[in-house]
Image (cartoon, rainbow, N blue to C red):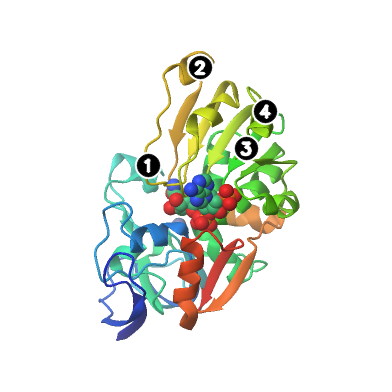
Amino acid sequence: MKISAYAAERPKASLTPFEYEAKMLGSWEVRIRVTHCGICHSDIHLIDDDWGISSYPLVAGHEIIGTIDQIDANVKHLKPGVRVGVGWQAASCMECEWCSKGEEHLCSGSRSVIKGHGGFGNWVAADSRFVFPIPESIDSEHAAPLLCGGITVYSPLRHHGIAPSMKVGIIGIGGLGHLALQYARALGAEVFAFSTQADKERETKAFGAHQFVLSTNSRQMTKLERSIDFLLSTASGNVDWEQFMGLLRPHGRLCVVGASPGKIQVPPFALIGDEKAILGSVIGNPAMIREMLEFSARHGIRPKTELVSIDHINSAVERVRASRARYRIVLKH
Ligand code: NAP
Ligand code: ZN
């Protein structure tokens, strides 16, 4: 069976039509006919080889919604015809310490869906334990971005116990950031949106921010010194880390999910005096993904999307590369 996709043949190249032969399904795998795929900034980092790990031809796309078509005989909990989603992770070893603790996303044998060619193609295969039925109330265009963007911000907010008494700041209001505002608000926190773009103020408030802060305005930033409990950085570029550390209250935490290419450098006293911490977070485990989908359905959390035909993939990729998507572009196959 031939799969039609769009691939990058080398770093930063335009995507060109690319066909490849489908592999036989492995144990526990299902094959999905892709209908929708979001464009995450990680797809751009991979196409451009920003992280130095890309191999070409590269078929990106890891916010996938589609319908199950084929299943391996081991799979009992999914059936052909079911509408499902797949995110970044398509498999793990299922045997190590982390897999047995339900933290499969930390498995060193984790495989990304892009390794076997991702959702910029019209079919993907994945281990059924990383394939999630989509709640009926969420349509496919809005479900796609939840599979990576949604879980990547939901997981740290839940894991770090965001509570109604807390002040939470979201740094960078793009695909991930605009979902983070909605989750933090639904969890009851007082929510601050930190953006470099003044014209995002009105929309950030509609997403749930109580306050908009122009992060390039030092007066607005200084006013918030020592006031925030938890900062979540989704910025795809470098920010002034030391300045943001100054906004945290004692015991405050800066959690980084945005994979900006530079280094995070702060002097030791940015951490010592008020016992602050910098930490990271990566996607989320399968149980958390199921919870995130339920939570999104119940609280009406939806990305603001632009639906684009896959034929226009190059102009869409270009807009995400330039951080001009408002707020997630979803490709329709
Ligand atoms: P996006 O939609 O392009 O949004 C990124 C936002 O970052 C922009 O809207 C902008 O927000 C801000 N930004 C961009 N360049 C900046 C710069 N030079 N300085 C400061 N801020 C800048 O990207 P996304 O899809 O949300 O992804 C965000 C990041 O998360 C990417 O690096 C991606 O690879 C990473 N990611 C990580 C994980 C994980 O598991 N940890 C999962 C998914 C994605 P403002 O305009 O509001 O300033
Ligand atoms: Zn992603």
Answer whether labels 1 and 3 touch (C-beta < 8 Å).
no
Between label 3 and label 4, give the one nearer the viewer: 4
Answer whether labels 3 and 4 touch (C-beta < 8 Å).
yes
The front one of 293 and 204 is 204
Q: Secondary structure at mark 3?
A: strand
26 displayed left or right of 300? left
The structure residue drawn at horizontal position 67% and vertical position 28%, both measured from the top left corner, is 224
Q: Residue 169, which numbered label?
A: 3
Q: Secondary structure at mark 4?
A: loop
Between label 1 and label 3, give the one nearer the viewer: 1
Answer whether labels 2 and 1 touch (C-beta < 8 Å).
no
162 displayed left or right of 76? right
Q: Which residue is mark 2?
A: 275
Q: Earlier in the sequence, mark 3 or mark 2?
A: 3
Count how many numbered circles sit on residues in the image.
4
Location of residue 2 with respect to 63 vertically, above or below: below
Neighbour class for label 2 at 10 Å: few (<14), some, many (≥20)? few
Q: Earlier in the sequence, mark 3 or mark 4?
A: 3
The residues bearing labels 1 and 4 have C-alpha atoms spaced at a distance of 25 Å
Q: Residue furthest top?
A: 273
Q: Earlier in the sequence, mark 2 or mark 1?
A: 1
Location of residue 171 with respect to 327 vertically, above or below: above
Q: Does ligand 1 reach within 8 Å of label 3's beta carbon?
A: no
Q: Which residue is mark 1?
A: 262
Q: Earlier in the sequence, mark 1 or mark 3?
A: 3
